[in-house]
Amino acid sequence: MTKFIDLTLNGISTGAIYAAVALALVLIWRSTRIVNFAQGSMLMFTTFIASAVISSGGSYVLGFVVALASGFVLGAVVERVIVRPVEGAPPINPVILTLGLYTLIVAIAGMIWGNTPRSFPAAFSLRGYKVGGTTLLFTPNDTFIVLVVIAVAVALAFLFRATSVGLRMRGAAFAPEVARLLGVRVGRMLTLGWALAATVGSLAGVLVAPSVFLGPNSFDPILIIGFVAAVLGGLDSPPGAVVGGIVLGLALSYVSGYEGASLVPLAALAILVIVLMIRPTGLFSATKERRV
Amino acid sequence: MSGKALGVVRGSTLLRSLAIVVVAGVVLILVTDSVSSYRNLQIAYGAYYFCVLAGLTVLAGASGQVSLGQGAFMAVGAYTFSKLNATPVAWSVLPSLIGAVVATVLIGIPVGVAASRLRGPYLAGATLAFAVGLPALADKFQTFLGGENGLVVNPPTPPSWLGANFSLERWEAWIACAGALVVVFVLYNLIHSAVGRSWRAVRDDEIAAALAGLRVGRRQALAFTISAGCAGLGGGLLAAVTQLASPGAFPLQLSLTLLAGVVIGGLGSLVGALWGAALLVLLPNWTNDLANSFSLSQNVSHNLPIAIYGLVLIGAMLVWPSGIQGGLRAIAHGVGPAIRSRRGPPASSTPATGAPEPAKDEGVKASQP
Amino acid sequence: MLTIEALTTDYGPIRAVDGVSFEVPEGSVTAVLGANGAGKTSLLRTITGLVRPSSGTVKLAGEDVTRLPVEEIVRRGMAHVPEGRGVIAELTVAENLRLGGLWRGREAAPLSEIYELFPRLEERASQPASRLSGGERQMLSIGRALVGRPRALLLDEPSLGLAPVLVAQIMVMVRRLADTLGLAVLLVEQNARSALSIANRGVVLNLGRVVAEQDPDKLIADDRLLHAYLGF
């Protein structure tokens, strides 16, 4: 029974990470109809930057902030410079482009920091809570992770529903040509969308780094699982991304606990295939075919 | 066209492909004779890369689908070869290779069926997950699959009638090239057959093809399965040549490197697959030499080929969506590379990979005059 | 207010707009008429900046806006109500309206003004725009254009798909807007009669070229013209 509780708690905290990655993917999908396969490498890169800051004497908080800020900048630059040219192209082009970007970023990270994984500090204690004599597999750091992700999700919801910027971004995402006719600078909104998404991704990177060790390829599984979570919830739906992340986190935690960690990627694949066969638009998507 | 004429046309593809294979075979025999062991090994590497790339380029270019799971299929081929070649089964090279292909095709069929119903980023994501998930199985079945260290393969000994001085590397090159020539033969005939034509019809306009009565799903599943078989052959050859089948040989990066290989060679072109294979073999050497001459660190030289693959993929999409071969074709026809105009009327037909996705967010498309 | 000079637009080898020139003064309605394929919509899209012209100029209040991006032209006071209404289905009625005026900031029209013009919209303010009928969408689209307090209003076939009663209401509304707000209205229509009934000036296009520019009464009286170019 303790094992089940442990796995459930673990699933919630890993699920929060997947939710954050899924959120980043969903934000980009909604604004530019592109799946950013480079997301995993981008968040790896910004986490490396944070690590460099912390290693050279900065505080954890400073590293955290730098990670988010560099994520924002990286997202904006990538959209404006690399992705903008393929935004109208057939869907296979941005797929290959973002995969190429992923490859490039991993290589550059390897060139700068080497390929040996290194440790990354956690924000809070990594010792499990003690409940009545047993130690749970849930730590104060995990609480931090879950709370931060929830806060981010709420903040984004507020941004989109209640602010002018959010309205512009939604308008630009749903109907770019019409939005331009309403004076919305759609290009800027797309860049902003990518910048925000990359910031959320960077957050996920910093949160998960302590447990996976920081190396150019350490975050690969997280990108894939984040993608599955986004598809599960519906690529169009930010709340779906959060729910999808948590559900997937739980499911994979049970798989890992009862069948072994090496089956996790395949389990994620199985879930992905099932969702795509049964309900391709995801659990929460309200997308209808847009008629011209 | 009369029946006789048709027969000649059909026959001529077969003859043409046979001629190509024979000529190439002779050339390879001569070349492997005259170069060093190291070069022969490189030829072997290039040959098994070619098998995989040829299958992938046919899949991508000829039928419009992208697969990032070829690394996983290679792993299936490699591990199957190792299992069959080693005791207690102890088959020789040829049956083991055939077994590798069969196993990969068997796995490729359900994957292909599933993949044929996916498009664009969904297909990419699913095949990515496959590429990461399958090699991880080696950890799960430690004893059977050898875990992290993998399975060791006995080196394929050259038959005695070739002489005692026949080097191992040359034999490996011959085996690998034989495999590559088989792939050329099969794919060349497929591309120029009715099957190939139906693939191209699906690639160019899925909806029109379906309306014309083509079973789109089946065609694409077939293309997928064939590319899996090619990758399996490549993997089996890899195991034979490197004498090892381990999860470390099939990381996620491999599938992306393969993608770069077909992109740079031109999607859909067998000749392009050849260029791609050559690049994959030679590039690490070139970058190593470059790094040494500039005294760059190990980190840089190790990652430089990967950076270049990334740049290739990015660059190709920005400049030449159909790779060098496509670019050359375009120049030959006097058509500029950037045909998509974001002004003026929307493009009337987008390639099939885009097909059933939610309509683009274009608000209202005003009617054209 | 709005001056079009020798405007020419090519889609590759096809010349969709061929040397079109006319003016739309403040407080007036200019109807652009023609059969399907005559180039009316291309003309409108060129004026708004969705399509780049090959030659010619578009001037708004004397300023040359020809080569500006769409959103910049809109921000100089040219509002475009697209064909098919272009209502953003995923947003609510109120959000659609607000979006139209965000670029204006404080000087945008308060939504209450729009609701006064179109009371039906206020009833549906918090409903997603996808639930609106054709006529309501047209009102929303026009209302949305007005939130930004434009100087020029371009309407692309507002009567399309609407019942005659609604068409008449909308035409009356457009006329009123031109008179009370001093808008320069460019009205592209296939429904020539209803357009001419409120217009100060009529421009007839055929194959991208202007074939007639007249007072509406003269146009309506010219049977030959009507048969040849307007289909009745």
Image: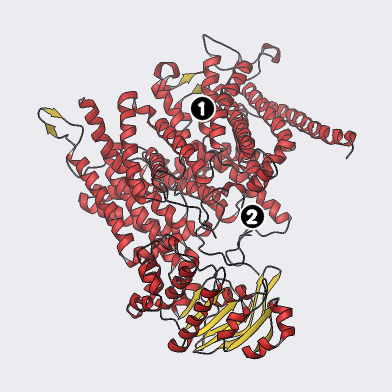
Instruction: Return the residue nearer the eye: B331 or A36.
Output: A36
Q: Is residue A187 above or below residue A110?
A: below
| Disc number placed over residue B349 in the picture, else none | 2
| Disc number placed over residue B75 in the picture, else none | 1
Provide the chain ID for the residue under circle 2.
Answer: B
Q: Which is more N-terminal, label 1 or label 2?
A: 1
Q: Residue at x 52, y 45 (%)?
A: B309
Q: Amino acid at mark 1?
A: Ala
Q: Secondary structure at mark 2?
A: loop
Q: Residues within 10 Å of mark 2 (few under 14, many from 20)?
A: few
Q: Position of residue A52 (x, y in %)?
A: 29, 49
Q: Position of residue C60 (x, y in %)?
A: 51, 85
Q: Is residue C124 above or below residue B158?
A: below
Q: Amino acid at mark 2?
A: Ser
> Farthest residue toward the top?
B88
Label 2 and label 1: CA atoms lie apart by 37 Å
Would you say residue B278 is visible in this rendering?
Answer: no
Whether pointer 2 and pointer 1 mark residues with C-beta atoms closer than 8 Å, the reply is no
Q: Left or right: C25 with respect to A42?
A: right
Q: Position of residue B276 (x, y in %)?
A: 61, 40
Q: How is the image coloured?
A: secondary structure
Q: Are marks 2 and 1 on the same chain?
A: yes
Quadrant showing the N terminus of chain B: top right
Instruction: Count the labels in the image.
Output: 2
Q: Left or right: A49 with respect to B20?
A: left
Q: Secondary structure at mark 1?
A: helix
Q: Residues within 10 Å of mark 1 (few under 14, many from 20)?
A: many
Instruction: Return the residue nearer the eye: A193 or C204.
Output: C204
